[in-house]
Image (cartoon, rainbow, N blue to C red):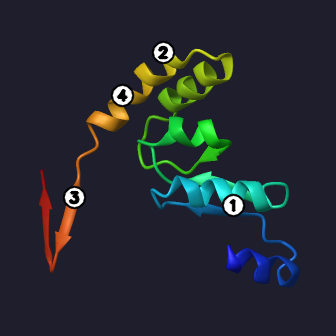
Amino acid sequence: MDFFETALPRIPNLRGVKHTSPSFPSMHMLLAKFGSRVDVVLGSDETYLEGLAIGIEGAIIQSYDGLVLQRVKQAFSRGDLTSARQDQVPYVLFQIPVYVIGYTVYTF
């Protein structure tokens, strides 16, 4: 938050931020305070539907299947939350967590 308060007057072409933190309250506050001047895009496939719910308009996604997430957005826009949740499920269930410990990568 402090970054944008300081940066916006100094960087006239600052237009957005990719928000990758799972902290939805901080995304919501960025939208509330700077949403008319800064685009906040989501950096996570598996939380796309939640991002739409707080007003996120776009995402920089990790997967290769943007068409499915487009269906999530279309269903959400129609008010069809059942379809939006069903389309979102693969991104929630099939994300393979990867943990890096030292120089070793573990997948579960």
In the picture of the structure, the residue carrying the numbered disc 1 is: 30
Point out the frontmost of discs 1 and 4: 1
Badge 2: how crowded within 10 Å, few (<14), some, or many (20+)? few
* Proximity of marks 1 and 3: CB atoms separated by less than 8 Å: no
Badge 3: how crowded within 10 Å, few (<14), some, or many (20+)? few
Tell me which residue sits at (12%, 50%) in the image.
108
Tell me which residue sits at (84%, 72%) in the image.
13
N-term-proximal mark, 2 vs 1: 1
Q: Quadrant of the N terminus?
A: bottom right
Where does the image place residue 55, in percent across and percent down from the top left?
A: 68, 42
Tell me which residue sits at (85%, 55%) in the image.
36
Can you tell which mark lies on residue 98? 3
Q: Amino acid at mark 3?
A: Val
N-term-proximal mark, 4 vs 3: 4
User: Relative to 12, is 86 above or below?
Assistant: above
In the picture of the structure, the residue carrying the numbered disc 4 is: 89
Between the residue at mark 1 and the residue at mark 3, the CA separation in whole angstroms equals 28 Å
Point out the frontmost of discs 2 and 4: 2
Between the residue at mark 2 and the residue at mark 4, the CA separation in whole angstroms equals 11 Å
**Callout 3: SS:** strand
Between the residue at mark 2 and the residue at mark 1, the CA separation in whole angstroms equals 28 Å
Q: Amino acid at mark 2?
A: Thr
In the picture of the structure, the residue carrying the numbered disc 2 is: 82
Relative placement, left or right, of 104 versus 49 is left
Can you tell which mark lies on residue 53? none
N-term-proximal mark, 3 vs 2: 2
